[in-house]
Image (tube, rainbow, N blue to C red):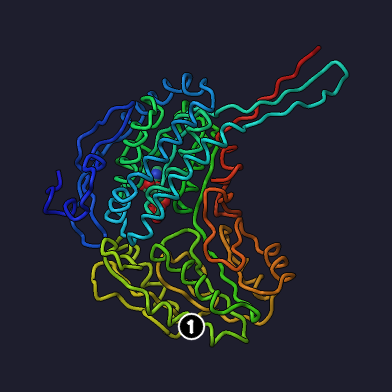
Amino acid sequence: MADGATGELGRIGLKRPDLFREQCYIDGKWTGDPTHLVHNPATGGLIGRIPNLGKSETERAVAAAEAALPKWRAQHAKARAEIMDRWCALMVKHQEDLARLMTAEQGKPLAEARGEVVYAGAFFEWFGEEAKRTYGDLIPGPAADRRIMVMKQAVGVVGAITPWNFPAAMITRKVGPAIAAGCTAVLKPSELTPYSALAIALLGEEAGLPPGVFNIVTGDAEPIGRVLTEDPRVAKFTFTGSTPVGKKLAQQCASTVKRVSLELGGNAPFLIFNDADLEAAAAGAIISKFRNTGQTCVCANRFFVQDGIYDAFAKLLAEKAGELVVGDGLAGVTQQGPLINDKALQKVEAHVADAIGHGAKVLAGARRDSHGGTFYQPTVLRDVAPDALLCREETFGPVAGLVRFKDEADAIRMANDSCAGLAAYAYTRDLSRSWRVSEGLEYGMIGMNTGLISSEVLPFGGVKESGIGREGSKYGIEEFLEVKSIVLQL
Ligand code: ADP
């Protein structure tokens, strides 16, 4: 166990210490020897341990989910919704504890973590309600004495793998619709941020989830992933993470032709036109780029700024970026936490060096922060070449690179020049342009005059290599439902 009151755990200061779980959750039981170490990215300190489970335990979790399925699926949606509602309420009730735990394991500022807890809980409430409305169809048959009925049924056992950047919301956005629809689930959270997931499981138990409906396995990603993608008892696999891992897992799913949802990397363009409200655009850019220290898949990654306002926008953005307070997320004033690990820091440094090598000029940051570790200063670069690494790949860090453009067609062409297609943003006060740009951008989500798009009511997802399927909204529950047709001969 971590060293209680004096170590990282003491600093987190949970009002309900039992929300900190160091065991996995399978078939309603806490299980596994905690051997794998989990550290706080802000301090490097040890938070605690988690079990290092593998194939056989994952198979056990799948068996538990399969056993729990018939009873859970057979209940009326209203009964499931009551539990989902309580689950949401418990998350809100324990918002502060969950937020502190999240900040400690992930590094994001406490204010962002508090927001994520409420956002994450909202998926339980929303999908509990949506599950009541999974309507079918009555189709006039192809002959006078034939009728066709269409009903929607829960897919079955769901396997889910989630990343570290939103340790709570990425889980509830998958597990919420799955469980509300009548599926049961086995989740592997990121090994970097397991404690939010385990606390959510505890609250699910308190909300009244029967054993086996929601199971959590932590440990070695490869063997756990193999079971969740290849076991024939798993009917649906849902993943959020990097594009290369997503492609590999989708291939594995092909062996049993599973339903698959993927939410993969983005490379979001952010377009600012001459007619934009510059203050609003800069504020939106800060939110979109620097939220979670640039570690969201919808973070703006490439800024395309029109000639006429280029210099003014660059100056404004650099000023605002320079004002962001960098530090440990648990210190209340922090606006920029650390990067998740050394690998992330190295990628950011490589992208900045490459951009500068291609002629970019530094307006803010471009260096490690005095807090040490993986802290990096909010960075703004101007005159970035469109073929710099910063534009070709997702940086996943606090670096805004500005590229100049002349006309609208030019901007849309550069914005679409990517194999990613998750989120895109544009600022313009011209109504016609806003439509043209929204329709022209090859992205799943467009933030028009806003840098913040996510909510539980938004169909979240991408096109091209950014993924398959949508999460959240009325569309999100369809990912966990099968369409069954019944042909009736009168
Ligand atoms: P990131 O680069 O954001 O960490 P990853 O795709 O590596 O994204 O990780 C997202 C999730 O996928 C994590 O839970 C991680 O443990 C898991 N993961 C990584 N590699 C594999 C794999 N080969 N099989 C199954 N899961 C994996």
Asked if residue 148 lies left or right of residue 268, the reply is: right
- Residue 361 picture quarter: bottom left
Which class describes the residues within 10 Å of circle 1: few (<14), some (14-19), or many (20+)? some
Where is residue 462 drawn, in percent x and y? 58, 53
The C terminus lies in quadrant: top right
Query: For the residue with label 1, is its CB less than 8 Å from the closest atom of ligand 1?
Result: no
Where is residue 4 drawn, in percent x and y? 13, 47
User: Could you say whether the residue bearing mark 1 is in a helix, strand or loop?
Assistant: helix
Which residue type carries mark 1?
Answer: Leu
Q: Relative to residue 44, is residue 403 depicted above or below?
A: below
- Residue 137 picture quarter: top right
The N terminus lies in quadrant: top left
Where is residue 375 drawn, in percent x and y? 29, 69
Observer able to see residue 81? yes
Asked if residue 333 lies left or right of residue 306, the reply is: left
- Residue 165 picture quarter: bottom left
User: Who's the residue at 42% across and 73% down the image?
Assistant: 399
Question: Residue tagged by mark 1?
Answer: 316
Q: Relative to residue 127, is residue 316 depicted above or below?
A: below
Asked whether 24 or 124 is in front, the reply is: 124
Asked whether 170 or 281 is in front, the reply is: 281
User: Who's the residue at 56% across and 66% down the image?
Assistant: 450
